[in-house]
């Protein structure tokens, strides 16, 4: 019996604002304990929070970059729980109406195709302080102290959607986290330094039998220190839950810790549900209404992500600087390329087809990439047919032209025209012999040293075969016959 894995991340990202979320205290690390605090971020009675506009801007920017809808009206809520690093006894967070909802992050799925991993919500909340134990850990410490420097630092929480295209393997999990981190760095909302706690992941893991509709209880693994441990924790949790299910033993909804030394997850506490936190709207803060002017300005201030796109194209996709430059300069073009490249092995070749052939068709038709009649998936199919030798480049060019005019798929056009490449070498040789016989002057010119004229002869062979010959092969045969 096969099992399906369902992985959902809750990622907390520390926003790169100069000051805290609800007071004017500066944000910094490595400073003396409690040197960046005030009555507001230490929760003194009688103080009132004032929302940091920059933090809202960065939250909305993230929402836009992650394809979310932005709520026109949102509000803050109190999440009540007791812990000594939380001086007010509640965390100001968001509950019913976060700033951003229903987005997605596109990653390469395990099948090689691009997948849109659902993002349920993105909300803004304040960080808590930090406990400092006299001897490293709570156990065995004589004293514990609280450092409130971190209290009130803005956090963006990005919650994936277990109902909509969830991650289904550890490799996808890794790609999701890496891509998410790259996007957030690119748009300048955080440096996302993992070791500085600026990018923290909690992961929800559950399993179900293939075909099963309902969800089984999930466990949450808190604050895992590195991407590698995240993979190990997910893998361990998956096996553990499958074994429980096979034995018919219950799997409890709970919060677990990953023991980095033993490489296992261990129970920490029963997982809280929303009712445990007794959420209610924070009466100290008014509703936040985001007007069109504000949204427009966030959109305008979205940093140009060309640098990130350039490095992704050259490093991850292996493109030349030139091709990368052409594709990176427009975000939509970049996305087109990424979508088209999902099942292509030779991505340099794909880039060539976009920057050379598709560009010239678009230019002639005065269209831009978002209006291209050839979708990235269709171009991908065409290039992959050539990759598998089922189509010559010349045929591919003709097919692309027709795809561009009709929006039809390559296979449809090829079938209709019954186009198949001439792979039989004897047939190719006889075509070449015919060309030589018909163009004695050109052949003489080539023999006398003007080698460029060979292109003319190749062209004649392509015309005779309606492009069904492989141009490189034709050239080789020509050379062999002309210079025996
Ligand atoms: Zn403060
Ligand atoms: Mn949170």
Image (cartoon, rainbow, N blue to C red):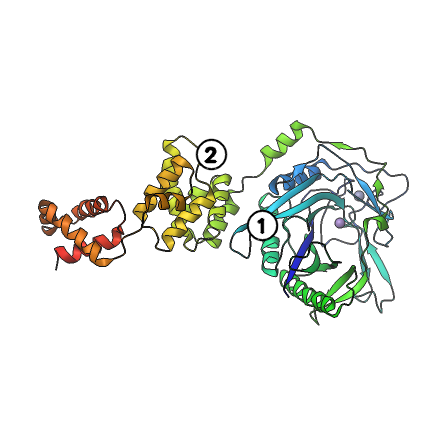
Residue 482: tell me if it is visible.
Answer: yes
Q: Depth-wise, is mark 2 or mark 1 nearer the camera?
A: 2
Looking at the image, which is closer to me, 238 or 366?
238
Give x and y (percent) for residue 34: 80, 51
Mark 1 crowd level (few <14, some 14–19, many ≥20, 10 Å Cα): some
Residue wearing tag 2: 371
Looking at the image, which is closer to me, 150 or 313?
313
Q: Residue at x 81, y 49 (%)?
A: 274
Residue wearing tag 1: 182
Q: Residue at x 9, y 50 (%)?
A: 448
Looking at the image, which is closer to me, 64 or 194?
64
Q: Secondary structure at mark 2?
A: helix
Q: Residue furthest right?
A: 45
In this rendering, position of residue 280 left or right of residue 60: right
Q: How many marks?
A: 2
Q: Earlier in the sequence, mark 2 or mark 1?
A: 1
Q: Which label belongs to residue 37?
A: none
Mark 2 crowd level (few <14, some 14–19, many ≥20, 10 Å Cα): few
What is the spatial separation of the Cα atoms under label 2 and label 1, in whole angstroms? 27 Å
């Amino acid at each position: 019996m096969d099992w399906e894995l369902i992985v959902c991340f809750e990622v907390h990202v520390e926003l790169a604002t100069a000051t805290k979320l609800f007071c004017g205290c500066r944000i910094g690390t490595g400073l003396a304990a409690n040197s960046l605090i005030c009555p507001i971020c230490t929760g003194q009675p009688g103080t009132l929070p004032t929302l940091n506009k920059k933090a809202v801007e960065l939250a909305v920017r993230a929402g836009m970059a992650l394809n979310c809808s932005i709520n026109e009206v949102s509000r803050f809520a109190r999440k009540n729980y007791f812990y000594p690093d939380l001086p007010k006894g509640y965390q100001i967070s968001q509950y019913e109406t976060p700033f951003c909802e229903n987005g997605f992050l596109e990653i390469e799925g395990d099948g090689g195709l691009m997948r849109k991993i659902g993002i349920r919500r993105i909300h803004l909340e304040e960080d808590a302080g930090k406990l400092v134990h006299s001897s490293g850990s709570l156990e065995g410490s004589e004293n514990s102290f609280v450092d409130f420097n971190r209290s009130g630092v803005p956090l963006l929480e990005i919650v994936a959607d277990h109902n909509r295209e969830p991650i289904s393997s550890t490799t996808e999990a890794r790609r999701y986290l890496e891509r998410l981190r790259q996007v957030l760095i690119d748009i300048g909302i955080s440096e996302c330094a993992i070791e500085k706690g600026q990018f923290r992941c909690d992961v929800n893991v559950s399993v179900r039998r293939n075909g099963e509709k309902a969800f089984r209880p999930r466990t949450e693994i808190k604050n895992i220190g590195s991407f590698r441990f995240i993979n190990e924790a997910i893998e361990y949790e998956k096996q553990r839950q499958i074994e429980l299910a096979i034995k018919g033993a219950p799997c409890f909804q709970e919060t677990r810790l990953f023991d980095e030394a033993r490489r296992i997850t261990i129970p920490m506490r029963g997982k809280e549900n929303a009712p445990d936190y007794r959420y209610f709207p924070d009466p100290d803060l008014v509703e936040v209404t985001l007007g069109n002017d504000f949204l427009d300005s966030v959109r305008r201030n979205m940093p140009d992500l060309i640098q990130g796109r350039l490095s992704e194209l050259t490093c991850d996709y292996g493109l030349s600087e030139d091709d990368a430059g052409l594709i990176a300069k427009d975000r939509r073009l970049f996305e087109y390329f990424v979508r088209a490249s999902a099942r292509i092995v030779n991505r340099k070749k794909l880039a060539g087809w976009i920057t050379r052939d598709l560009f010239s068709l678009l230019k002639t038709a005065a269209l831009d990439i978002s209006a291209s009649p050839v979708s990235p998936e269709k171009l991908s199919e065409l290039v992959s047919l050539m990759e598998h030798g089922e189509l010559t480049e010349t045929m591919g060019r003709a097919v692309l032209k027709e795809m561009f005019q009709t929006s039809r798929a390559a296979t449809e056009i090829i079938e209709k025209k019954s186009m198949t490449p001439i792979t039989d070498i004897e047939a190719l040789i006889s075509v070449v012999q015919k060309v030589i016989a018909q163009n004695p002057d050109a052949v003489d010119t080539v023999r006398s040293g003007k080698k460029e004229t060979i292109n003319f002869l190749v062209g004649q062979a392509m015309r005779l075969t309606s492009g069904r010959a492989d141009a490189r092969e034709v050239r080789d045969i020509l050379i062999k016959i002309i210079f025996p």
